[in-house]
Amino acid sequence: MADEFILETHGLTKEFAGFFAVRDVSLKIRRGTIHALIGPNGAGKTTCFNLLTKFLRPSAGTILYKGQDITAVAAADVARLGLVRSFQISAVFPHLTALENVRVALQRQHGSSFDFWRSKSVLNRFNARALELLNDVGLSEFANTAAVEMPYGRKRALEIATTLALDPEMMLLDEPMAGMGHEDIDKIAALIKRISAKYTILMVEHNLSVVANLSDTITVLTRGQVLTEGPYSELSKDERVKEAYLGAGHA
Amino acid sequence: MTSITDATLPITPRAVRDEMIVFVIMAALLAIVPWTGLYPFFVMQALCFALLACAFNLLIGYGGLLSFGHAMFLGTAGYCSAHALKVWGLPPELGILVGIAGSFVLSVITGYISIRRQGIYFAMITLALSQLLYFIYLQAPFTHGEDGIQGIPQGRMFGILDLSKPTVLYYVVLVGFLAGFLLIFRTINSPFGEVLKSIRENEQRAISLGYKTDQYKLLAFILSGTLAGFAGALKVFVAQNASLTDVEVPMSGLIVLMTLVGGLGTVFGPVVGAFVIVGMQQYLAGFGQWVTVIQGTIFVACVLTFRRGVVGEIAHLFKRSL
Amino acid sequence: MQALYAQLLVGLINGSFYALLSLGLAVIFGMLNIINFAHGALYMMGAFCAYFLLSIGGIGYWWALLLAPIIVGIFGMVLERTMLQWIAGLDHLYGLLLTFGLALIIQGVFQNFFGSSGLPYAIPEQLRGGMNLGFMFLPVYRGWVVIFSLVVCLATWFLIERTRLGAYLRAATENPTLVRAFGINVPRMITLTYGLGVGLAALAGVLSAPINQVRPLMGENIIIVVFAVVVIGGMGSIMGSIITGFALGVVEGLTKYFYPEASNTVVFVLMVLVLLVKPTGLTGRAA
Amino acid sequence: GDKTVKIGALSDQSGLYADLGGPGSTLATQMAIEDSGLTAKGWKIDVISGDHQNKPDIGTSIARQWFDVDKVDIIVDVPNSGVALAVNNVVKEKNGVYINSGAATSDLTNAQCSPNTVHWTYDTYMLAHTTGQALVKAGGSTWFFLTADYAFGAALERDTTAVVTANGGKVIGGVKHPLNTSDFSSFLLQAQSSGAKVIGLANAGGDTTNTIKQAAEFGINKGGQKLAALLLFLTDVKSIGLDIAQGLNFTETFYWDMNDQTRAFSDRFAKRMKNGAPPTMVQAGVYAGVMHYFKALDALGENPHDGVKVVDKMKSIPTEDALFGKGEIQPNGRTIHTAYLFEVKKPSESKGPWDLYKLVGSVPGDQAFTPLDKSACALLKK
Amino acid sequence: MPEVMTANKPAAAAATSTILDVKNLESWYGESHILHGMNFNVNAGEVVTLLGRNGAGKTTTLKSIMGIIGKRTGSVAFNGQQLIRMTSDKIARLGIALCPEERGIFASLDVRENLLLPPVVRPGGLTLDQIFELFPNLKERLKSQGTKLSGGEQQMLAIARILRTGASFLMLDEPTEGLAPVIIQQIGHTIARLKKEGFTILLVEQNFRFASTVADRYYVVEHGKVIDGFANADLSANMDKLHTYLGV
Ligand SMILES: Nc1ncnc2c1ncn2[C@@H]1O[C@H](COP(=O)(O)OP(=O)(O)OP(=O)(O)O)[C@@H](O)[C@H]1O
Ligand SMILES: Nc1ncnc2c1ncn2[C@@H]1O[C@H](COP(=O)(O)OP(=O)(O)OP(=O)(O)O)[C@@H](O)[C@H]1O
Ligand SMILES: [Mg+2]
Ligand SMILES: [Mg+2]
């Protein structure tokens, strides 16, 4: 069944000195879908992400990616396998132009990154692909702007373009809309929708309208454990979810 | 954390062209030195230090790593070359190769250890490692401890170039310097250089893109250390001795000072800085006792008011990359 | 076996200096995010200050123990106000470079006026002589050094880790702007902390004046060893730097006994080993 | 040839050796010019000084520049063995004259001897020999060495051991300590428990003074063991202070308070020093060496600007001066003169700030220095 | 809901008097000129919300009032006192507190120390028990290192710690960012409660829906200037305009 589910966890657990941030979480993420992870603050969503991308080492449990056990694989190698994350705080190379930002990612894939004796003009062969990616996320006019000078929402988009350049199969997005204005939220939401045709996406988000509109499946975490799972329409009626996450006044 | 180098300058094709023009002017100026009546030993010494500072700058300016122990490569290569020339009686070209090999091995080992930490820790680790090496060289018999290796034969390079003739030696050193400089220049503007820059900008992000950043930093460290060793090997022919001075902490400080004065992370800054500092040492020798105080004052003044260094300020003024 | 005990005790004495110095470094690093390269020079100034107090003012050891750290501490605060403050917020490496320059200046000036050979400073009357411990002859003064520095170290630890002032200090390390916006005069606190760290260095200097030569370069090498101590211990924790300081003194003492030729390299070798096994240092948090 | 001379006083102006050489050596050179009376005979003599900072490469580059650019004829002083040997090569290459007073290494007149070099004042062989012999004869039959772990320390220990055993003494142990150690207590404990009668300090500078100071603290003297410093200068004793240094034995070839002549010179010298200090033996050696150089020039009638020629002339004239008395320069460049064994006075015996030594013995030059048949100098094989 | 202790001023009497008056406020980050003459005021006991797009200068306004920005000119009067040349520690001691956008939790302090860090500048703050009632999560994690808290927990801690100080003028910069809907509701209640007790609150919000549940008045900020302002009562009348301003 490795084909149907791109990522699976079994009994994933993370303990911090006696405190269980994540406890016995088993997830199955279907290939080609948008899967959302929601839950109240401190439920363990970010910790889950950190476990999946190897920024933290699980206390127990296993992680299967494309049927392969990656529980003990190093962070950089996970990225090489096509499982790439974005950060909660925007992560770009500030003094590189948008084009260069994307090129750095392309370069990694196509070797030659240790070549200190060659001119960097060999990198120009990546320009076309980089522009294409920038175009995909609506940044073509920013190609030669340094990332530091771009507005917040655009940095977010640039980060996604950079991630796409790695040609991932699956992307993990942690609160991609945090701190964004409405305009940008809509843009990024549309972007995520568009790219989900090609990639599997797992995201954490508190913005309910985004979650409702985008996700195919939602897993609700509370106190480190899976509370329930299902499509939004189902969950929004679930009393437990209302109490733990949506709040009493939620319509 | 703000970066230690001026990253706001443009990195455009024009920048590379500007830099090439300046390079040609510099090479031409250096080539006519023997006809200017300038004391050639002074210029040769300055060239060795310039190459050394450039190698150091590769690490700090483009890798964001400040090594406070770069003298160890200078000294190690010097001892290796000197030993090869004097004891084994090797010809100059092989002597230089032995020196480079020595510093290469050292840089692999020390690099492997020190890139485990960043920032201030990295500086302290390199400092401590160089002190460790200093004590080893102080006790090792082949270095002759405090006395150093003296009276090293200059010999004939490739069997034809008589290095005991100042003019011949000068051009050999100049060619060595220019070759080293060009290699560094190329490294900065290579695919590898691009990755290095992005690691300096945001290491976490580089990791998440799948780069094993330690390997890149290690390569940068090895390149820097080995080139510093090349400078040390050349210096053996100029000074005709190899001594503990070249592995001591003050020497490492001097390298930092040269680069700082010229401009950290600028292409030509270290060269200018080396000439300024070596010149100062020569011509302020009369102040004798006050030289360390003057050096300290320059450090302080640079950090407080002149952080971009000579070349950095000029580059900033003209909004050009130099 | 007896000789071994003696060496252990002797090691502890050196450890006191490492501990005091690395503690001062850690305090300054914690607050200003600066590796104080001038620490060795300020340690030297502490010793000189004791010397001047005695030779010019006729003020003896006990008062020097109090006054020298204060005087040198004030000097440090002036440095902080006039220079270090200007580079706050810049890359930490600038702090390293600036204090390196300051060390050169201070040491150079002292060298110009006092040459390189040492000046004498006698052990105070009350602490002369020694005790026969059976396994060794322990000079009273050395015993005093161990006990006194231990007390100072623990008091500093308590101040920083267990008091409100300490919480301010740690918070201001991370985000001085915000702490200031809570109503705390952060610049003054930074100045005082630098003074405290410098004062600890000067105190070590006074303690060492009677047993080492009072010379302008007395701090030059020890500071590099202390850097290695700091790398081994990690600067994240005050207690860490105290314990590693003492521990490394002991290790060094044992090396002097078993393989004296390596006694000035052992700390560095240890540093390399620690880095290979645990890059963040023994007590350090990830940077 | 002509009648111009340019002298370069190359010394450590700010470091460890600045007090025993440094500005004082430049002053000694200056006084030699004045006292020689050559200016009255129409000679034009200049002095420049330089700071080698104890770094061989800085030393050689200054020396080379002096010869190439400033046309210096002679380099004097150069304390620090490493620098001294490095400069030795340059002087030979440039055929200048080199009168070394400050360096301890006996290599200058052995394996690395040069026809351009004269080594005045002292060397490791002489120090080891004089002190070792005298103390064994005085009953110091068992020795323990505290040796600085580098070439210089090893040489001192080796030479002293040879003398001690030759005179019927015995070396019962030793410990090598790293250079520039600040804490010697471990090593002193080992020396103490060895029970040796004499603890020989085969180290120099700060290491020696620190050892002496800490030895007092551990009650070594009171325990009946005697310290023998193999290399110690007036300035070191001054900095340690009499109450700690008292009773210490060591060798020097000059002390300001020897006789009327030395006192007269020292008075004149001290008046012109910033800190009013009398000359050290190194500074005295510079004075005497330069004076002898002038004698040779005077005899030649002009300056041939040919180092070997001048040095040969210097070797052909016996040395005699107010400070070191009678002596000679051997073919290998070694100047020999009487060596003295001193003991540091008790505080109660001292009558002035610089009244520090009392003379306890002396060894004639031909017995104190390396005998020619043991010298490895290639010049002797001609 | 805990009982909030008496604040400094009776709510009713204060409603009319201007407590904060900002005139022609201009600010710079280094070379870049961000605020170009802000004009607005806040009355005692009010909740005033600054709205505006990303980068409009809302955060900068708060920082300028707090005195933690490089260079600023114009006039900021607080209870008649001029703040423009005061350092931030003095400003804080007047009873102004800021909960910053990036939260500013201290990694080297545990949760308790973080909570107790800001000194009490005047009487009238909440007690620890009252705070734990508001944010039970914090009580459980008291021993934890500050930055090991989840994003939302950090936000709660950032708000909680300034409630202790007794400052009566609170500036909250996007307090709901990254919080779960349940908690947002809770924060809404808290703000309402604080207001009732006489606190004055200057709020910056992107979440317009949330703002509308608590605010008395709004100002709209664009390019470093206030371009519009209206009371909550007039909200529906201004909805269209707001849509164009904010692109909602
Ligand atoms: N390194 C750590 N050490 C100790 N506790 C931790 C650590 N990291 C996280 N925690 C705790 O684990 C719990 C889960 O944290 P996590 O960051 O995963 O929450 P989250 O679901 O992402 O919440 P939010 O929506 O607020 O971001 C929290 O209570 C947090 O305090
Ligand atoms: N430290 C800084 N240095 C230079 N420019 C800055 C700095 N911080 C913010 N800016 C710029 O100032 C402008 C106003 O920023 P500010 O943070 O006040 O906006 P905001 O209205 O709070 O936006 P948001 O809703 O994104 O928080 C923006 O254009 C931003 O890029
Ligand atoms: Mg989270
Ligand atoms: Mg904002």
Image (tube, coloured by chain):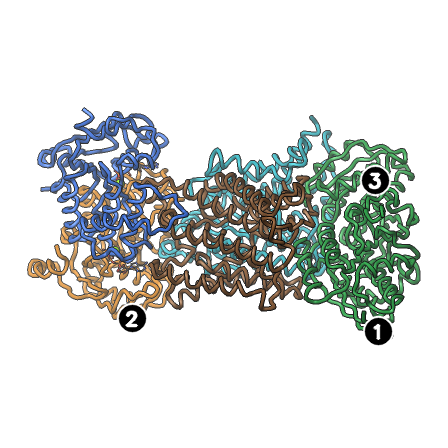
Chain colours: A blue, B brown, C cyan, D green, E orange
Q: Residues under labels 1 and 2: Cα distance? A: 79 Å
Residue B178, percent across and down? 50, 56
Tell me the residue that label 3 is attached to: D226
Q: Secondary structure at mark 3?
A: strand
Chain name for mark 3? D
Chain name for mark 1? D
Q: Is residue A28 left or right of residue A70?
A: left
Tell me the residue that label 1 is attached to: D39
Would residue C201 be seen by someone viewing this image from the given angle?
no
Q: Residues within 10 Å of mark 1 (few under 14, many from 20)?
A: some
- Please identify, in this view, whether the residue under mark 2 or under mark 3 is nearer the observer: 3
- Please identify, in this view, whether the residue under mark 1 or under mark 2 is nearer the observer: 1
Q: Are marks 3 and 1 in contact (CB under 8 Å)?
A: no
Indicate the amino acid at tag 2: Gly
- Give the position of the N terminus of chain E as an image quadrant: top left
Q: Secondary structure at mark 1?
A: helix
Using the image as rendered, state which of residue D326 and residue C173 is in the foreground: D326
Q: Secondary structure at mark 2?
A: strand
Chain name for mark 2? E
Q: Residues under labels 3 and 1: Cα distance? A: 50 Å
Using the image as rendered, state which of residue A187 and residue B278 is in the foreground: B278
Q: Residues under labels 2 and 3: Cα distance? A: 81 Å
Disc 2, ligand 2: is the CB inside 8 Å?
no
Q: Is residue E139 left or right of residue D220?
A: left
Residue B124, percent across and down? 52, 46
Tell me the residue that label 2 is attached to: E74
Q: Is residue A21 left or right of residue D136?
A: left
Quick check: which quadrant has ligand 3? top left
In the picture as drawn, the residue positioned furthest to the front comes out as B160
Indicate the amino acid at tag 1: Thr
Name the mark on residue D99. Answer: none
Residue B248 in the image: above or below residue B208: below
